[in-house]
Amino acid sequence: MIEWHSNGVGCSCSLLGEDSNPRHLEEDGFITITDTVYMNNSNYIDYYLAICLNCQTQYKIEEREYHSLWWNWIKLGQNKS
């Protein structure tokens, strides 16, 4: 990862994966969660909408659980503003 970052290949948000908790990343100042969508008639989170504060890439982040909690990061595109 250090070599990838030092070569300037892209933003580190493209390395986010199943163990990347969006709430922790927001607390650390890497992303902003713009919306939290809950499953129908429940308190369970279906997905988050978020934006990377470095490159402005927007993500849909599905929160899932099987044996443990994990997140599916889906790139939606980049904010042009």
Image (cartoon, helix red, strand yellow):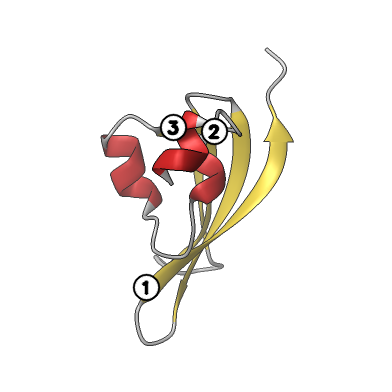
Q: Is residue 34 visible?
A: no
Q: Secondary structure at mark 3?
A: strand
First-in-chain label (3 vs 1): 3
Give the x, y percent position of residue 61: 54, 54
Which residue appears farthest toward the top when viewing the image?
A: 81
Residue 69, numbered circle: 1
Q: Is residue 80 above or below residue 9?
A: above
Q: Secondary structure at mark 2?
A: loop
Quadrant that contains the C terminus = top right
Q: Are marks 1 and 2 in contact (CB under 8 Å)?
A: no
Q: Is residue 73 visible?
A: yes
Q: Which residue is mark 3?
A: 32
Q: Which residue is mark 2?
A: 11
Quarter occupied by residue 51: top right
For the point 40% across and 41% down, which residue is it?
Answer: 2
Give the x, y percent position of residue 6: 46, 30
Q: Nearer the viewer, mark 1 or mark 2?
A: 2
Amino acid type, label 3 = Thr
Amino acid type, label 2 = Cys
Observer-nearest of 11 and 47? 11
First-in-chain label (2 vs 3): 2
Observer-nearest of 57 and 66? 57
Label 1 neighbour load within 10 Å: few <14, some 14-19, many 20+: few
